Amino acid sequence: MMNLRRRVGAAALVMALAMPVAHAQTPAWTEIVATARGQSVNWNAWAGDEKTNAFIAWVGDEVNRRYGVKVNHVKLKDTGEAVTRVVAEKAGSRDRDGSVDLVWINGPNFLALKQQGLLYGPFTAALPNTAFVDTTGKPSNRVDFTVPVDGLASPWRMAQIVFVYDQKRVADVPKSMTDFVAWAKRHPGRTTHPNVRNFLGATFFKQALVELVADPARLQQPATDASFVALTAPLWAWYDTLKPQLWRRGAQFPDNGPAQRQLMNDGEIDMMIAFNPSEAAVAIHAGLLPESVRTFVFAKGTIGNTSFVAIPYNAAHKEGAMVVANFLLDPATQAHAQDLRQMGNFTVLDLARLTAVERKRFDDLPKHPALPTNAELGHTLPEPHPSWMTRITAEWERRYTK
Amino acid sequence: MSESQHGALRLTQVRIELAGRELVPALDVVVAPGECVTVMGPSGCGKSTLLAFISGALDAAFRATGSVCVGDEDITRCAPEQRRVGILFQDDLLFPHLSVGDNLSFAIAAQVLDRVERGQRVSRALAEAELPGFEARDPASLSGGQRARVALMRTLLSAPRALLLDEPFSRLDAQLRGDFRRLVFRHAAERGLPTLLVTHDPADVPPGGRVITLDDFVK
Amino acid sequence: MGATVHEVNGVPLRAGTSRWRRALAWAPVLTMTVFLLPVVAGVVGTLLPAFGYLPALGGGTLSLEPWRTLCAQPGFATSVLLTLSTGFAATLLSVVLALGLCAFAYGRPSARRLGAVLAPLLSTPHSALAIGLAFLVAPSGWLVRALSPWLTGWTLPPDVATVGHPSGWPLVVALLLKEVPYLVLMTLGALNQVPAARQLDVARSLGYGRSVAWLKVIVPQVYPQIRLPIYAVLAFSLSVVDVALVLGPGNPPPLSVLAVRWFADADIRWYFPAAAAACLQLVVVAGSMVAWLGLERFVARATRGWLVAGGRGGAAASATMLIASVCGLLFVLAVAAIVGMALWSVAEQWRFPDALPSAWSVANGVRRLSGLATATWQTLGIGIAATLLALVLVLACLENEARAPRPPGLGSLWLLYVPLLVPQIAFLFGAQVLLVRLAWDGAFAAVIWVHLVFVLPYLFLSLADPWRALDPRYARTAASLGASPARVFARVKLPLLLRPILIACAVAFAVSVSQYLPTLFAGNGRVATLTTEAVTLAAGADRRVIGVHALAQTALPLFVYLAAVIVPAIVYARRRGMERWG
């Protein structure tokens, strides 16, 4: 008798563990949804890309339809603006009813807010859809630039460095960052990178650093004065030979990714770095790049990372923000986002944890010659510690701003 | 519309100076109802300033002493819109944004609310000015003489108790000048209005009228 | 003549509606408070952090640390030099071009409508022109596309820097596009105070050519009257942010852009050097004005001999003709900039080196336009509210001035110009901190208030001259007919001055539409106007979207201006006597 009961109990336990976690609607979550109804969430997000803006608008419509939560897209030129606002509000002692409810955030900005204790949470455990997030194959979903997220931010899109080139004008592509210099010498003035202050521009340098440094594991540690000088020496040597071969002889750089893309569209450059693997396909579809562009990555892998949304400590509408964050993780939303007619952002979810129906949504997404497959993207390299990025930016300005 | 029960226009010890320079020395004048007194003098000697003082529009740069009375009422400290002293300038100054009829209607007291009554008064005034049916006309489409007549009628419609004339004839050509002059004096006499005329042209002086020359007083 | 005396024999007049007059007497004080308080509070609020004092952010003691950080910034000297060089170049060129154009055009029958042609250009926001110009002069831009490959043989854009050139010359050109018309209109306005036509006749009868006569006779008289507008131009050129963001070099950028960048930085320790940079900007502007004064003296002394040397010179004639051609070229550039953006808004595909779009889509253009709806409504709402508030205050001040004993002195003119002379960056940060403290940031009302600070001076300056020039005898006549001052105001003054009032409102509305930094700071990013959206997107978003934005930015004030011209014409269609007003 006892043995049978124990065996049945054990089997039940095993079955429960083996089944994918269903939409566990905890009582706390239903309360949150109820409180959120009628709230208006100020989602501070970088607004330099029309597609992303359109997606955010779509999210607003859907969330309003299903949960009665309105979304106000506060358009930023730079995520730093939202951080400044939260800091200013803390300075002004406004600890409730903050003007920022949800912020699209990464890297140093996330680190800044986390370190100053300006984030609400941890809250991701309360979101039912967090269960679908891929935390093993995509480690960047848990650790943002070597900073543990600790549930203070919820992922919503993935990015991986790719390179886009116009195959009508150039036939050869570099195989690595080291090869970049040789390529640039063959095609002087036909490639560039965004300004180092921009996230994508700094990532260009990070990719180079990760490839040029002898021991990449040391980049996971915070940079010190000594380690920075030592480890970045090959980077600056490499860059000094590259810079004169860049567009405008390296005297001028586009401000951000879309500006760089416009240069390619205008025919001023033939190759550029991008953070979104589907960028080329999406851009061709929207008429922002010529049909002849294609995407490639390096064989040894490129840096990948996750975009998060976080809730400031003084947000006026925390529940609404959590509903939005949860909606972003909904498999249907993620598939919609990956659709290259929308944003074309690769998903943060683990497809294996989804039901067959939901997985099919991803399989049915449209394909494109400029769109790499998951296999082609290879594996991602981890991001260095954020302090490397800030130091690289400062050092670049010191060296090249006269 | 003739009211012959007006009082006299009395100026008592009116003295106006500007920056220490005396423009109008202690002036005592009594203008009887229906009488027209002419003030003459070369330009710049204070004739228009005197009229400005009487009508209540004297610039703050001037310093004035003395009093002005109409009939029994001392109007020296009244606001300009309460003095009921009509003034005609060289230019007709018909409001260009209003029609002829509206210009005239503007002068009728606000207490007369009945639109029909107001319209009738306007028509009567236009008939007197020999401009029947001109209510809807644009003032800019009238000739100089016609505008001058309308301006006179407008002033008279406001039922003033005294009349000030600041060289109103000088813009008109010789032919019109005589006709208009006679018209003005006739109406002023009919209504028994004490009238003060300022001019530099001796021909403007009404026959038998008193003349005061300001430069006799200027030191 | 025209102000009524309130005292006779030292005894006050018995006032008819003293309640109104007492209320009106508050108008100047209220107006000054409304638009000077944010400036003064803002400067103080920026000055203190510049010296390290901002307790809320951990800066408790005064120190020079922010200044040391500022000076240690790589490229700092270049930033300052760039600011000074572009600022002075733009101002000098605009003064020379404006005066030269006036010398050439004044009195010529063909140039009679010059004012009317320039006014719509003035209503276009700076940032829209900058965005259009960026497309025009880029190496892959319209000018090159129009000439390639048939003239230049280029199938790829040349690798030459124009937008973002380290010297900042596109920035200077963009500034000239608006500053030259502004100074020309100010000069034409100032000419009303000088019997210019008669003096020119005299000079020409003495044998001087038209242009030389204008330069030697009119300019010395008119210059003191346009000195304040020139200072406003100088202050603006030195501290402009939105145009510099679009066209200026980024590495290093001019000082004001540096300050804005640091304010937006995630690391709060950059607040203090940002405030220091803003204060430095204020010092730079103040110092430049002093330097300009010295330059005036120098030029006056240097040309004294030339003035009376007797040269009746043909050189001046050809110089002014050259200047007039340059001005014409600038006008063409401005129009081309806007037309380029208009083409982009209905283009579907426009690749280099096509001279015109290869695919069109009006439907998509309309769809993009509908995406602007929120920004458009907000721009409209803020503009109308600020303009109406400013109009009420200005009318109250002007009417009070007419009824008050004392005529306004020159000091009040300087006060009016204060928001135009103090760089925006120098007081907007302090104003934002104040607004956060009052929990008012991001509110529509706060944005309207900050816009009011800039709208009010322009509205006052546009309306004051026509208002004061109204023949005072109209008011006297109306008063003698028994109309109270209120009735005179409503039934005589307002209708007679309808056209100048509407045009002043159009100017004020255009100023509100152009504002970038004030909306950004006071609105805390929650308020999006066409200008803030356009500048945010200008860095490289879809040019078709940018085109629609720039077009909307231009069209809105233009419509208001056209309405201001057309409405009085319609209202007074049957009143020929109203044609000469305005």
Image (cartoon, coloured by chain):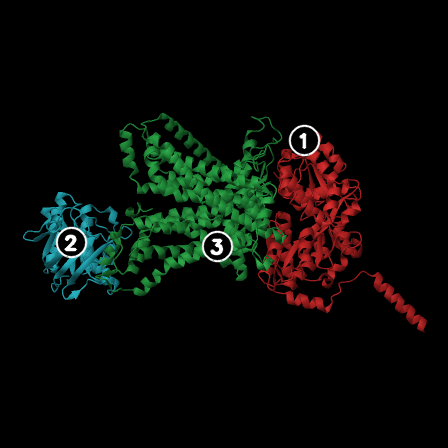
| Chain ID for red | A
Give how far across and how far down residue A16 sits, in percent: 84, 64
The label shown at residue A188 is 1
Q: Quadrant of the C terminus of chain A?
A: top right
Going by the numbered disc 3, the residue's amino acid type is Val
> Mark 2 and mark 1, same subunit?
no
> Would you place residue A123 above or below residue B206 in this image?
below
| Chain ID for cyan | B
Tell me which chain the residue with mark 3 is part of. Answer: C
Which residue sits at x=28%, y=35%? Answer: C199
Q: Residues within 10 Å of mark 1 (few under 14, many from 20)?
A: some
- In the image, is A182 to the left or to the right of B43? right
Name the residue carrying label 3.
C450
> Can you see residue C306?
yes
Name the residue carrying label 2.
B24
Marks 1 and 3, Cα distance to the nearest angstrom?
48 Å
- In the image, is C48 to the left or to the right of A261? left
Going by the numbered disc 1, the residue's amino acid type is Pro
Marks 2 and 1, Cα distance to the nearest angstrom?
90 Å
